[in-house]
Image (cartoon, rainbow, N blue to C red):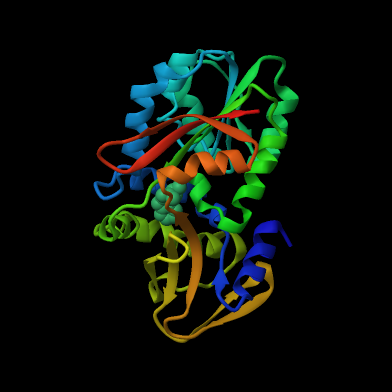
Amino acid sequence: MNQFACEVRSGLAKPQKELPSKYLYDELGSALFDAITALPEYGLTRADRRILNRHAVDLPRDFACVAEFGSGSGSKTRAILEAIAPKTYFPIDVSPAALDRCTRELCGMAHIQPIEDSFLEGLDRVREAQESGALLLLFLGSTLGNFDSRCRNDFLQQVRLRMRSGDAMLIGLDLVKPLETMLDAYDDPTGVTAAFNLNLLGRINRELGGDFDIRAFAHHALYNETDRRIEMHLRSRINQTVTVTEADFHCRFRADETIWTESSHKFYADEIPEIAHATGFVSEALWVDEEWPFAESLWRAV
Ligand code: TRP
């Protein structure tokens, strides 16, 4: 049984059913995510890009290499490569489709070495490939917010272990904002985010021989006040049983029972330097967008 099948099986066996969000990004999922970033309700990517366009020139220039976690289509990265002119750029992504698009988009701006892997394994491979000089790691789009808060510092420490002093990380984090604004960003009226979320069931059908009736599930986004995060779920509209042949199991759903597919934590600007400090970094700069509360911070490994 492959890893996807194992993780689907164990996630759907939990009392609160869940599926790992990295599987949202197959070819169709990556294209739908690109569409999300263009939605009027999803201000996050535009805020990220505004800050990068304005402040790329303020970044230190002493980096020989740039690596990026979850590069996606790479469209936000252009300003940084222009300002820094690194020798090599290593986009790290689980989606080969996203890596292809990113390589085409940024072609000619550096020597591009795409790495199809998860983040820490990908960073290990950057370390093996990188000769000398300091590394700037990009962790944009509030992707850290998609980590479970209990694993977050542990993950950052694992990143820090793979860096040398003098290396840096540029990290983009979405900030707490009015409830309606946050909910609309993850439940747009045109249904693109719903399609992105539901595609995970389509992917299980295609790759693992599942028989999910996708119309019998609905996208559901909520804000969990206590944990300060948007949660994305897939809610079963009816009582039903689903079979996933490749994962060798049946799964029963009660009406209104949900599968939890993603979280997106929201931060306060004040806590960002504290997170840096707790995980072996020093925050050297923090920029906040004026239109859409979003912060970009430069963390130096010390
Ligand atoms: N890092 C993005 C975020 O937290 C990921 C994301 C955006 C996302 N929209 C989504 C994930 C919709 C799942 C569904 O905002």
Q: Residue 219 or 124: which is nearer the viewer?
A: 124
Residue at 71 percent across and 33 percent down: it is 162
* Quarter-of-image position of residue 228: bottom left
Percent x, y for residue 141?
44, 41
Percent x, y for residue 89?
57, 22
**Can residue 148 be seen in this snapshot?**
no
Residue 13 versus residue 55 in the image, above or below: below
Residue at 24 percent across and 59 percent down: it is 189
Q: Residue 133 or 38: which is nearer the viewer?
A: 133
Q: Quadrant of the C terminus?
A: top right
Residue 211 versus residue 38 in the image, above or below: below
Q: Is residue 102 left or right of residue 246?
A: left
Percent x, y for residue 236?
43, 78
**Can residue 285 be seen in this snapshot?**
yes
Q: Is residue 111 left or right of residue 297?
A: right
Residue at 67 percent across and 42 percent down: it is 157
Q: Residue 236 or 26: which is nearer the viewer?
A: 236
Residue 261 versus residue 49 in the image, above or below: below
Q: Quadrant of the N terminus?
A: bottom right
